Amino acid sequence: MAQETTPTRVGKSSDFEPGAIALVEINGREIGIIRLQSGELRAVLNYCPHKGAPICKGFIGGVWQSSGPGDLSFDASQDVLVCPWHGFEFSLDSGRELCWNKRSRLRFYPVHEAEGDVFVSA
């Protein structure tokens, strides 16, 4: 049976700017709070499933797409977290790694806003 967790206040809503990563510690876990371009929040364990890097030390970007040789375009509408060690890219929508299509994915925690504050259950 899963253990219930009490949401922890991690800051004011205004503390979390789009495209930035704010690190917080909850119950001994380092968690990155990220506001997406859409305004939604993500709470991500600061651990890359590839080799254990502090993934929240990476950057948020879009995706390079190609339909074949000589065709390369950048899609800034997708929020992707790029690992600082090996450049692995993870979708901030699904948590899945985008290039290798492996089963590993980012660990997300429930996050919500209420009355101008942000809360994470971890």
Image: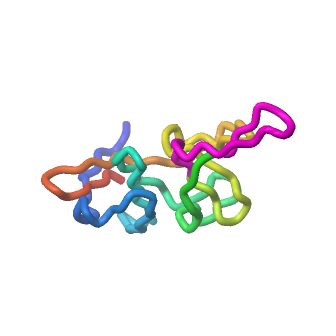
| 3, 109: nearer the viewer | 109
Q: Looking at this view, name the residue that lies furthest to the right.
A: 69
Q: Looking at this view, name the residue that lies furthest to the left.
A: 115
The magenta region covers: 64-80
Q: Is residue 29 left or right of residue 39?
A: right
> Up-down: is 17 above or below 111?
below
Q: Where does residue 4 sit, x and y in percent of width and height?
A: 29, 45
Q: Is residue 60 left or right of residue 9?
A: right
| 57, 122: nearer the viewer | 57
Q: Is residue 3 left or right of residue 57?
A: left
Q: Quadrant of residue 84?
A: bottom right
Type of colouring = rainbow
Q: Where does residue 25 sit, x and y in percent of width and height?
A: 38, 68
Q: Where does residue 87 sit, x and y in percent of width and height?
A: 70, 58
Residue at point 29% right, 66% down?
A: 15
Q: Is residue 22 left or right of residue 4?
A: right
Residue at point 32% right, 49% down?
A: 111
Say if the magenta span includes residue 50.
no
Residue at point 70% right, 39% down?
A: 65
Q: Quadrant of residue 55?
A: bottom right
Say if the magenta span includes residue 71.
yes
> Up-down: is 110 above or below 69?
below
Q: Where does residue 113 sit, x and y in percent of width and height?
A: 23, 50
Q: Quadrant of residue 66?
A: top right
Residue at point 57% right, 62% down?
A: 59
| 59, 50: nearer the viewer | 59
Instruction: Give the total number of marks visible in the rendering.
Output: 0
Q: Looking at this view, name the residue that lies furthest to the front.
A: 70
> Secondary structure of the magenta portion, mostly?
strand
Quarter in which the N terminus is drawn:
top left
